[in-house]
Amino acid sequence: MKIFSGTSNKPLAQKIAKDLGLALSNLEIHIFPDGEKRVRVLGKVVNEDCIVVQPTSPEPDKNYMELFFIVDALRRSGANKIKAVIPYLGYQRQDHVFRIGEAVSLEVIATLLKWGGVDEVISFDLHSIKIPEIFKIKLTHLSALSIFAKEIKKIGKESVLVSPDMGGIRRIKILSEMLNNMPYAVIEKNRDLATGVITMTGISGKVEKNAIIVDDMISTGSTIVTAANLLKNKGAKNIYVFATHAVFSKDAPNILNNSALQKIFVTDTIDIPKEKQFAKLEVLSVATMISDNIKG
Ligand code: R5P
C-alpha cells in the first residue's frame, strides 16, 4: 500500500502514514504562473493500493482539482484501488436543491470522483447522514463524536449538550448516549438563504449549567457566537464548543476568540494555518481513527 498527500493537509497525512508504518510517497506538484497545476507521481505504483489524503476546504475548488489530478496520475501509473481520504468534504452543504434553479454541487463532486477513478472515499462528520446515498462509490462516514466524548467527560457531569440547530439533533442524541444520557437542548435557528444572516429564536431544554455546543463545522463563526450569546442570556455558566471541521472563513478566529466562549475544540480534518490559530482553540486529531479504518 502507498499513501500520498495533496497540499491541503500534509500534517494529517503524515500522522496517518506514521500510524500505518509508512512514509508518504512522493508527488511532484508544479504550479504554473497562471495558477494551473501539473501533478506527477514519483516512483512505482503498479498494482499498489493507494491512499490519497486531501480535505477539500478551503479553497474547495483548488483542492478538488488537485485531488482529481493526483488520482488521474495514479490511475495512469497503474495503481490498483484508490481510496480518497477527504476528511472534510467540500460542497457537502449543497446536497439538494434548496431554492428552485440551484445546482446540486455535491452531486457534481460525487460524479467527478467516480469518473476520475476513486474507488472509495473516507470522510468525517458529514452534514447529513443521507450524503453517502448520493455517491455511487463507497463512502465511509466516520465521526469525531467519540473523541469529543472523552474531552466532555473532563468538563464534568453538570453540563448540558446543545445543538445550535434542528439539523444537529441526531448528533447530540448520539453524544448524549455516549455520556450516560447527558441532558441536551436544541436551539431554533433560521438562516436567510439569500443573505446568509442567521437568527435564533428560542431554545428547548434547561441550560443553567456548563453548556457544550456541538456542531459539524464552524465557518464564519456566526452560528456558534449567536448560540453562545443566547445561552449566556438564558443563564448558562461556562460555554464550550466542539465542532469537527474548522473551516474558519473570514474573521472567524477573531470573532471566536473574543466571544463569551470558554474554549473551542475542533479536529484536524482541516489544517489550521498559524495565522488562524488562537488562544481559546484546542485541536484534537482524527488521524488514528482514519488509520484504524484503513487497517480494517
Ligand atoms: C449549518 O447547518 C452547519 O451545521 C453549521 O452550523 C454552519 O455551517 C456554520 O456556519 P457559520 O459558522 O458560518 O455560522
Image (tube, rainbow, N blue to C red):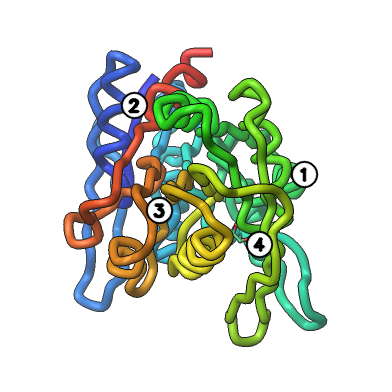
For marks 1 and 3 on the same chain, the one whose residue lies earlier in the sequence: 1
Q: Residue at x 36, y 74 (%)?
A: 250
Q: Residue at x 58, y 60 (%)?
A: 234
Residue 65: give x, y in percent of width and height.
43, 60
Q: Which mark is residue 173?
A: none
Mark 2 sits near ligand 1, with its Cβ under 8 Å away = no
Mark 1 sits near ligand 1, with its Cβ under 8 Å away = no
Q: Secondary structure at mark 2?
A: helix
Q: Amino acid at mark 1?
A: Glu
Residue 136 visible here? no
Quadrant placement of the N terminus: top left
Residue nearer the viewer, 158 or 15:
158
Residue nearer the viewer, 25 or 40:
25
What is the residue that sits farthest to the bottom in this orientation? Answer: 195
Q: Report which residue position mark 3 lands on.
A: 246
Q: Amino acid at mark 4?
A: Val
Q: Secondary structure at mark 3?
A: strand
* Other residues around mark 1 within 10 Å, as few (<14) / some (14–19) / many (≥20): few
Q: Which mark is residue 16?
A: 2
What is the residue that sits farthest to the right in this orientation? Answer: 100
Q: Amino acid at mark 3?
A: Ala
For marks 2 and 4 on the same chain, the one whose residue lies earlier in the sequence: 2
Q: Report which residue position mark 1 lands on.
A: 133
Q: Residue at x 30, y 64 (%)?
A: 253
Closer to the eye: label 1 or 3: 3
The Cα atoms of the two marked residues, 2 and 1, are separated by 27 Å
Q: Secondary structure at mark 1?
A: helix
Q: Report which residue position mark 4 lands on.
A: 108
